[in-house]
Structures are given as C-alpha cells and as structure tokens.
Amino acid sequence: MFVRIRKQPGKNGLIPYAYVVNNEWNSLKKKHEQKIIASLGRVNDLPERGTIEKLVSALDRFAGKMGWATLSEGIILSNLTDENILSQAKDWGPLILTGHILKRLSLDKIISGSASRALKKKISAEKFMAATTAILAHRLIPGNDASERSTHLWYDNSVYLPDKTALTDEDLYRTLDVLIENKDTIEKEYYEKNRNLFNGKLDLVLFDTTSIYYWGAQGPADEKDLLQYGFSKDGKGNLKQLIVGVLMTTDGVPIAHEVFKGNTADVTSFSRIVTILKEKYSIDKVILIADRGMVSEENIVHLEQSGLSYIVGIRMRLLPQTLKKKLLVPLDEEEERYELEYLDKASDNLYVKEFPVSKFSEDEISDLFVKKIKKGKSATFNEEAIIEAVKKRRFFVCLNPLVQAGVKKKREFFTKIIERKIRTTPTKEWIIKNGYKKYLKFEKGLSPSIDYDRLRDEEIYDGKWIIMTNEKNISSYSAGTYYKSLQTIERGFKDLKSLITVQPVFHFKEERIKAHVFTCFLSLVVKWYICRMINGYTQENGYRFIEEMINLKAIAVEEDTRLYVRTAVSREAQEIMGKLGMKIPGKVISDRRVKLAHVSHSPGRPRKDRSTGQINLT
C-alpha cells in the first residue's frame, strides 16, 4: 500500500490529487493492478489543511482502540498477534468484575464506611479497599490456594491494573482484622441497602451448616478453642475443623453467616443463629427450613421450647413402625387412585397430603412422641407443655408419581441383575459390592437368595419424602415448595467449597480464621449477584460468564512501550456485561506511549510553513 499522485483535468489545467492505493494480484490477467483505497484530496491542499497529520493521528487512535498495529514514536508496531511481541499475560478480569459488583451492591461504601475508624490506625483506606477487592477476586478463581500469602503473591506478580496499589502481606492481614471487627455491621447494612433483592421481607430463611477442615497445627484441642475435632462432612476426621452456618432466603440470597466450634452440634448452631438473626435484623418471627440431616427429636424439642418455628425434613426410615405405617404404607391398588384424588397438588408432579398430629389419638401421641421425648437428656421435660407443643406439629407426605415410577422400574432391573448373578456367578465377591448384601438372605450353607420381602418393603418410600412444621399458617403447597428450595442452600455450600476457594486455612489466630471465612462469604455474595442478574432460574450462565471474566487477560505489548491490550470478549459476555451495568472495555487498556501531536481543528488562517508529507512527532 502506498500513496500515488494522479493528475486530473481542471479549469486551470491538470491538477494533482493524492490517492491511497494498494497493489493487488489479478490472477486472470496474471499481473498486479492498483486499487484505490481512499482519496486524500488535492496535493497542494494537504499541508495547509493538515490532512496527513489528522489522518495518521485518527488511524492511530482507532488502531489503538481495536488493539491493532499502532505507532510508537513514529515506528509502526507489528500486528499484536505476533508471538514475538506478546510478552506477558496478566489477570485483569476478576479484579474489574469484583470491583464493579461491590459497587452495585454498595459494599464498597459499606465496607470502607463501617471500618473508617479502624483504618486510621491499621491501614490506609486505599490499601484496605485494594486488599479487600484482591482477596474477594482471588476467591472467585477455582483451584487457587486460598491463603492470604498466596493471594498477595498472585496480586503482586500476576495481576494488572493501570494504577495498581502496592500491597504487602501485612496489608492483607490487617485488612482481615478490620473486616472481622465490623462483620455484623457490614452484613446488616448490606441487607438494608439491598432490601429489594430480599423481596422486602425476611421472615422465611434457609439454614444449613458445613464443616471446614484446618491444615495448620493439630494436636489436642482445648474446649475453649474454635478449632475442634468433630464429624467432618469432607471426610477429614483426622483434622481439626470449624463449623460454618449460612443463612439464605428461599430465592438463594445469602444473608449472613456464623462460625461455630468444630464439635458444635447442629441443634446448638440452629437455635443460636436464629437468635442472632432476630436481634440483628429486628425480625419478629423467623421460620427456619432445615434438611433432614440436621433433625432429631432432641433438636425439634429444643426449637419448640425456644419458641421457634420450623420446616424440617424427616428421615423416613428412622420413624417408628406405627408412625411409618400411618404416614407411608400405601393403600391397596383399588384405593390408590382414590387417595391421590384427595392430595393437594402442589405442582405438576408433586402431591402433598397433610397429617396433623392434633388428630392423632391420645395414646398415639403418648407412645409416638411423649415417651420418646421423656427419655431425652437435654430437653426440659414438662408433660403438659410437651403435649401442647407436639399437637402443633403437622406432617406433610410429599409424593412425586414420576419419581415413584422411575424408582420402581430401577428396582425391577436391579432384581433381575441379582437373580442373574445368583445363577451364573460362582464367586461371592459381588455380594459386598453395590449394596447387594442387604437384599440377600442366607439359609442353608452359604447359598444366597433374594429377600423379596425386603425389596417389597422399599416400595413405601418410592417417590416420597416427609416434612414437618409447627407453623399453623403454612399450607401444604407452601410446605412442599419451601422444602424443595433447600437445594438452593445446598448449591450455595457447593459453591462455597468448590467455586469459592476456601481451603487451605493456615491462620493461627481465631479471629483471622473467622475473617478468612467472612471473605469467602462475601465472595459467595458476589457470585450469587452475578448469577441472579444474568438468569434468575439457573446459575449455569453465571458460571460461564465468571469463567470468561477469569480468563480475561491484560497483554503487555513490549512493556517498554507501556502499552497493554486485553484479550477477546465474546458477544455473549458483552451482552451480560451490559446487563450488569459494566462498561465494555476497549481493546487498549492502557497506552502511555508518546503520542502524535494533536492537530487543532479550530478555524483560522491556514499555516503555510509546512512542507508536503510533514508529520510532527513529540
């Protein structure tokens, strides 16, 4: 490509015009031909109008925005995709995403404002917010080491920001100290500022706990310590742990969290966090929804004696036979359809039938509940109060006919497999695999046979689950759908321990361990908001967007030139950024090279002291 002058006829003879032309090969004529790309105008007018300078400057700015070849001190750089030029890729997307969401949720002002007093003594406001953003962004990247030291190394060596605040390890530790000192204030103001996201009312919350193991020093644990040995939900019973309880709304909005000793029973955390919640948010009544894994008769009595409302799952196989028969044993085939007609249809594939304890006989109440409670050690036994509380209980048996049919079909297939193995497999190794043994019986010798009675007994559980509440104003429809929403908090815990990097925890001070968990909770809030704004029904789109933002890099193009460009952003990601109110960044993130002199467009007499083709570089 080059500039060619062609003379065109005019009033005063031939007038020279400048054209940008390109040589192109004509395969038919077997020769090169010149194709005009653009006309620059009369040659004599070019210096007076500054056309060349304006054109070069405009093309340079445009190329810079698009991340294409640009001018650096008058030298044209090669195409930015050239492997010889791309020197280093640094993380950039997680920082800008986290910073933007903190602003959207007003958490930047809440966090800095609530900690303003402590900041003067421990850390500057600028470093505090930079460290907080870096910690939360680092938590969003799966597979990272979640320690604060690792976060600092990542921020210091692998992160690009145009004006990055310098941080030390100590700055991150001081940030943790300030955050945990203001935890309750931050959570409360976060709720108040975003009340519209909580549907304006907080009277129904989901609660569950999980264990987080500790990689630091082990050894004997003092009973006063936060870190204790206990039942590990990660299968790390040989390590000390702590218990984290998280509260969410039925829509999956993270509200608050609390940290408990590693050997804390669920019932203790269950009642304590409700008390904290009611005091913190000035709520008159809270109904807690909890999974069946948290429920025992002792727990239920503890809640009832504390005056708390609940919706809990019941372990069907642990019910007394009398109560199991009353709630679960199906009618004969002729009456099965008759029973379904009287169930409350909560959704297309969910039926719910209520069994209020108040309609049980006095003997049934005594045998099924009161005697069992009386044997408990922790409950304060007052027979009249216990009976009154028990009569408020309502059982709901939920049935999904599609699941019921599917389980029955699987059992029939499972039975055929066992029958074939008994006939054809001489070795008995298969018996202890895949849970076969519990469906076999051994009569004479060691020859197994199928226990068909036990297989038939399993049918009463097909497609069913039981929930219980002491709240009189909840309908069977609400009870069924509320309990189904527990999958939301289970997904939240999955995120907390997989999508949000929690492990490892190395801190020696208990307050910093709590602060570490708090930053993970805040990252969960960031992740939840992104997923909710993108799609209120599924989180998959949010996960993909977060992954794309994690992969958004800042590329240093010959670092001496101080030019950074970004990697590509897909069209889908650009649309999502618009939904989140994010400004789609230009191809050039930062350009601090020496620029071409800007040519003024102001009117006035043209300058005549420029020669043709003059370019002013400064």
Image (tube, rainbow, N blue to C red):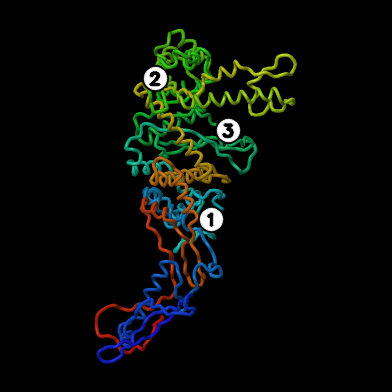
Q: Which residue is mark 1?
A: 152
Task: Give the alpha-carbon distance from disc 3 to disc 1, as whole Å.
Answer: 33 Å
In the displayed structure, 616 sits above or below 576; it is below
Q: Amino acid at mark 2?
A: Leu
Q: Which labelled disc corresponds to residue 263?
A: none
Query: Three-letter amino acid code at disc 3?
Result: Glu
Task: Tell me how far mark 2 sits from mark 3, CA to CA.
Answer: 50 Å
- Label 2 vs 3, first from the N-terminus: 3
Among the 4 quarters of the image, the one containing residue 311: top left
Of the two numbered discs 2 and 3 in the rendering, the one whose residue sits closer to the viewer: 2
Relative to 146, does residue 338 appear above or below in the rendering? above
Q: Which residue is mark 2?
A: 343
- Name the residue rendered at 48%, 52% in the picture: 137
**Element type at mark 3:** loop
Give the CA separation, mark 1 to mark 2.
58 Å
**Farthest bottom residue?**
12
Mark 2 is surrounded, within 10 Å at the Cα level, by few (under 14), some (14 to 19) or many (20 or more) other residues, namely some
Query: Dot 3, crowdedness within 10 Å: few (<14), some or many (≥20)?
Result: few
Give the position of the C terminus as an image quadrant.
bottom left
Camera-near label (3 vs 1) is 1
Q: Position of residue 473 (x, y in %)?
A: 34, 23
- Amino acid type, mark 1: His
Residue 466 image position (x, y, % from top left): 46, 22
Q: Dot 3 corresponds to which residue?
A: 223
- Residue lying at the far front in this picture: please name it: 28
